[in-house]
Image (spheres, coloured by chain):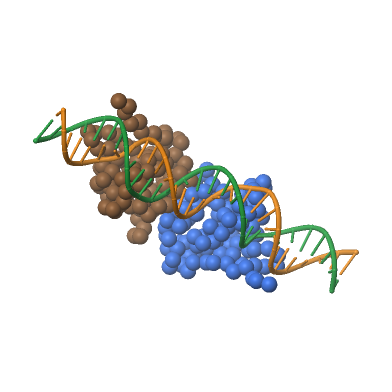
Chain colours: A blue, B brown, C orange, D green
Amino acid sequence: MFMVQFVHPPRSEISLAGVLGALADPMRLRIVKSLAAQNDCMSCTEAAPCPDMAKSTLSNHFRILREAGLIRTSKQGVQHRNVLREEDINARFPKLLKMILSYPE
Amino acid sequence: MFMVQFVHPPRSEISLAGVLGALADPMRLRIVKSLAAQNDCMSCTEAAPCPDMAKSTLSNHFRILREAGLIRTSKQGVQHRNVLREEDINARFPKLLKMILSYPE
DNA sequence: TCAATAGTTCAATATTAGTGAACTATTGAA
DNA sequence: TTCAATAGTTCACTAATATTGAACTATTGA
């Protein structure tokens, strides 16, 4: 009955604290690394950082990434398509994302 | 009777998640910016991001920065001398700190 | 010795994260 | 069309973390 509505901040409202906070979690960092490596959209389960994580936890991580402006989510069929908002992040904080993703750990 | 002991992680144990998490707070980011601008040690109150913050809150922010490996604290008289561990951070995550501190907000 | 200064620690409350269970929405097949 | 499977979300509960006032420790200087 009620469609799930995704909340995406406009580019101008993407904050540094928000971005850093979203990336300051090893699981979320792995999600973002997956999305960056794929260079395409991925479903939540495809980008899941580990197989044994609770669905609700995974969903929460995607929500945090979305609300921080790091990813854009749209619905396609039964899945959610998540893409990295690379252009937006780069426009706000040039080179930051690439640099953070470049570290091995 | 009991000296306050400061906990500082060795360089090798400074983690990306720890650094990003520590910097993902506007107040702590301001503290680190102050220390970077000063390029010297500062007391906690000198580097305080706003004057009306509770002492205990300020103390807690410094503890988080310290435990993340971002600052080194030593005691001098009645004050604590805080310095940015720039070399250590740069060794672990080259250019990251400078980049994060370069954004205006 | 006493007051002032600089922080820390403690205890209480408030916010946030992780998770299982129940739910919604879409697809595909009987 | 109905039903099961799939993909996520939302809710409710618990656990961890942040904020703050009050009490405390340590140092200095009068």
Q: Where is residue B66 shown, x and y percent of the image?
A: 37, 40
Residue B70 visible: no
Left or right relative to B95: residue A39: right
Residue A68 visible: yes
Q: Where is residue B67 shown, x and y percent of the image?
A: 41, 39
Compared with C26, A96 (above or below) is: above
Residues A92 and C19: in front is C19
Left or right relative to A45: residue B92: left
Q: Where is residue B102 shown, x and y percent of the image?
A: 35, 55
Residue furthest to the top in view is B1
Left or right relative to B101: residue A49: right
Could you tell me which residue is drawn at 26 percent across and 43 percent down? B42
Quarter that holds the N terminus of chain A: bottom right
Marker count (numbered) = 0
Could you tell me which residue is drawn at 47 percent across and 61 percent down? A89
Could you tell me which residue is drawn at 65 percent across and 71 percent down? A2
Q: Where is residue A12 shown, x and y percent of the image?
A: 43, 68
Could you tell me which residue is drawn at 45 percent across and 44 percent down? B18
Q: Quadrant of residue A84?
A: bottom right
Compared with D1, D7 (above or below) is: above
Residues A73 and B12: in front is A73
